[in-house]
């Protein structure tokens, strides 16, 4: 880096309340580290933003210096979209704050907050926002991509609860987007990813959720055909207060799973029941798990919603190797089941997995072009994730994921949840994600970011459409 940029970075350091970390500083490797350790990039600087003023300063600085900009929320992007080589990382992690207003059932959430921050703050009031299933995921990237999790069938996607967003635009200006103000931007933010600006605050509508029924049921992997055939019929017909995502896994070596099945390849369903636990018995709600085949293990218990949200955190600490790909499904065909069995029997590492997340129910009551999310008619959002701590396994887990995805893709609806697009997927895949909404997204991009300043994302170029 030349002297000019070094001098400029010094002036940035003086201007910000957040810390600026360059390769010369101690802590650089920590500052550039992201959740997926398969991604190793070396930015010119990581600029921590403590408030909106800092965000405006960093956006303007990147503009003036011509440095590439990446925006980091929770840092969970699989393909590492929050990190650039030689450019500037606008790091929102100092903006982790949540303010709940129980009078209006809304929460304002700082742009760098994690799901656990939001769940913690809203749980006190018996409220929650539907979001993802791992508490260390960023609210920012998850929401801008759409967001689905345990509460989705009942209360919709995360974007369906978004009331407004404060945004710093490419020219450094600041707007609040909502149904009434900048409605075109508000439409695009609900699914269009990080293409349109830096969101410094999300305002969400909250829903009554406190203690939920958690359960997990697993069957030997060779029962996958019977279980999936039962699951594909049962789940979409079940009441919306019952959510269950299908999983192929190697059983983790810890509670609640008994030691004899640790490490065994299994198929299973992870359940969340948001019905009335005072009157309904969880065992009775889930008695159906015996229908397809006798489970190898079934465990059910009520728990506070934030506890459920944090349940998988210890299994999935930062620093693992990840490679993932996704697709939407409106059915699980017999041919798809054959593919699931084949790759489920050959899961390459203990943590590698495949999940089918239900996105039917409440999300389908929102119109196909009411938000940028392009698959209101999908029933499942699927993800295949190769995961392992050892960098030596990076290639085997990538290959398993790519092969699995290649065999399964013909049985999908054609596009993927934008947040499940993997590394080295193409611009065509981004287009397929948005279907009929793509051209409108490109038009909004032309209005708000005509130079494609925000391009470290699943990019929608302003020239497209
Ligand atoms: P980052 O890597 O920080 O950012 C991802 C993208 O969003 C980048 O382009 C970034 O620029 C942009 N971005 C982030 N914050 C902002 C902001 N405030 N303003 C503007 N742009 C921003 N998704 C689900 O829907 N449901 C799940 O249950 C789920 N589970 C997951 C579990 C794990 C362990 C992981 C790793 C991911 C999971 N995901 C899930 C996917 C997740 O939604 C995406 O990885 C998402 O991008 C994470 O957001 P982030 O802020 O942590 O990511």
Image (cartoon, helix red, strand yellow):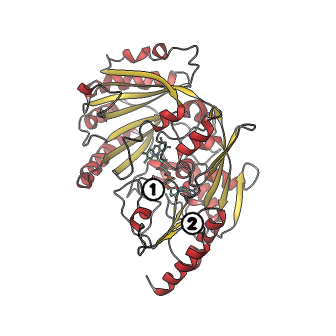
* Label ID, residue 18: 2
**Which image quarter is the C terminus in?**
bottom right
In this rendering, the answer to whether 60 lies above or below 289 is below
In this rendering, the answer to whether 85 lies above or below 443 is below
Q: Position of residue 225 (x, y in %)?
A: 31, 25
Q: Residue at x 42, y 26 (%)?
A: 232
Left or right of 232: which side holds 338? left
* Label ID, residue 168: none
The yes-or-no answer for disc 1 within 8 Å of ligand 1 is: no
Q: Position of residue 71 (x, y in %)?
A: 53, 62
Q: Residue at x 50, y 59 (%)?
A: 457
Q: Nearer the viewer, residue 202 or 19?
A: 19
In this rendering, the answer to whether 377 lies above or below 402 is above
Residue wearing tag 1: 428
Say whether residue 128 is visible: no
**Which image quarter is the N terminus in?**
bottom left
Left or right of 305: which side holds 350? left
Quarter where residue 15 is shown: bottom right
- Disc nearer the start of the sequence (2/1): 2
Q: Residue at x 55, y 74 (%)?
A: 13
Q: Find the residue positioned furthest to the front.
A: 26
Of circles 2 and 1, the one toward us is 2
SS for dot 1: helix
SS for dot 2: loop
């Amino acid at each position: 880096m030349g002297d000019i940029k070094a001098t400029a970075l010094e002036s940035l350091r003086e201007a910000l309340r957040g810390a600026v970390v360059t390769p010369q500083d101690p802590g650089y490797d920590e500052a550039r580290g992201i959740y997926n350790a398969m991604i190793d990039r070396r930015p010119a600087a990581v600029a921590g933003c403590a408030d909106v003023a800092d965000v405006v300063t960093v956006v303007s600085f990147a503009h003036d210096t011509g440095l590439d900009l990446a925006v980091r929320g929770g840092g969970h992007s699989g393909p590492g979209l929050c990190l650039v080589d030689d450019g500037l990382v606008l790091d929102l992690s100092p903006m982790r704050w949540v303010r709940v207003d129980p009078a209006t059932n809304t929460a304002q959430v700082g742009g760098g907050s994690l799901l656990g921050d939001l769940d913690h703050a809203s749980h006190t009031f018996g409220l929650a926002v539907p979001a993802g299933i791992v508490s260390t995921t960023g609210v920012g990237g998850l929401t801008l991509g759409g967001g689905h999790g345990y509460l989705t069938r009942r209360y919709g996607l995360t974007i369906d609860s978004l009331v407004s967003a404060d945004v710093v635009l490419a020219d450094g200006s600041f707007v609040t987007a909502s149904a009434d103000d900048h409605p075109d931007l508000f439409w695009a933010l609900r699914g269009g990813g990080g293409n349109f600006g830096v969101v410094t605050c999300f305002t969400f509508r909250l829903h009554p959720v406190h203690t939920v029924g958690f359960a997990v049921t697993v069957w030997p992997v060779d029962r996958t055909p019977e279980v999936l055939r039962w699951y594909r019929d049962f789940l979409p017909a079940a009441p919306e207060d019952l959510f269950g995502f299908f999983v192929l896994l190697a059983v983790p070596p810890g509670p609640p799973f008994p030691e004899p099945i640790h490490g065994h390849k299994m198929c299973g369903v992870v359940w969340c029941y948001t019905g009335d636990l005072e009157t309904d018995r969880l065992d009775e709600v889930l008695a159906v798990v015996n229908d397809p085949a006798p489970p190898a293990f079934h465990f059910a218990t009520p728990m506070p919603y934030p506890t459920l949200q944090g349940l998988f955190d210890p299994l999935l600490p930062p620093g693992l190797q990840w490679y993932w790909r996704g697709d939407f499904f409106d059915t699980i065909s017999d041919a798809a089941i054959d593919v699931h069995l084949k790759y489920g029997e050959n899961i390459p590492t203990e943590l590698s997995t495949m999940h089918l997340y239900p996105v039917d129910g409440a999300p389908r009551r929102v119109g196909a072009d009411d938000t940028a999310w392009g698959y209101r008619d999908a029933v499942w959002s699927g993800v295949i994730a190769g995961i392992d701590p050892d960098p030596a396994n990076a290639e085997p887990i990538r290959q398993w994921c790519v092969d699995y995805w290649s065999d399964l893709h013909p049985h999908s609806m054609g596009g993927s949840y934008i947040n499940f697009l993997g590394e080295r997927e193409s611009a065509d895949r981004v287009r397929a994600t948005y279907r009929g909404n793509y051209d409108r997204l490109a038009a909004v991009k032309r209005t708000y970011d005509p130079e494609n300043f925000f391009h470290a994302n699943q990019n929608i170029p302003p020239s497209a459409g």
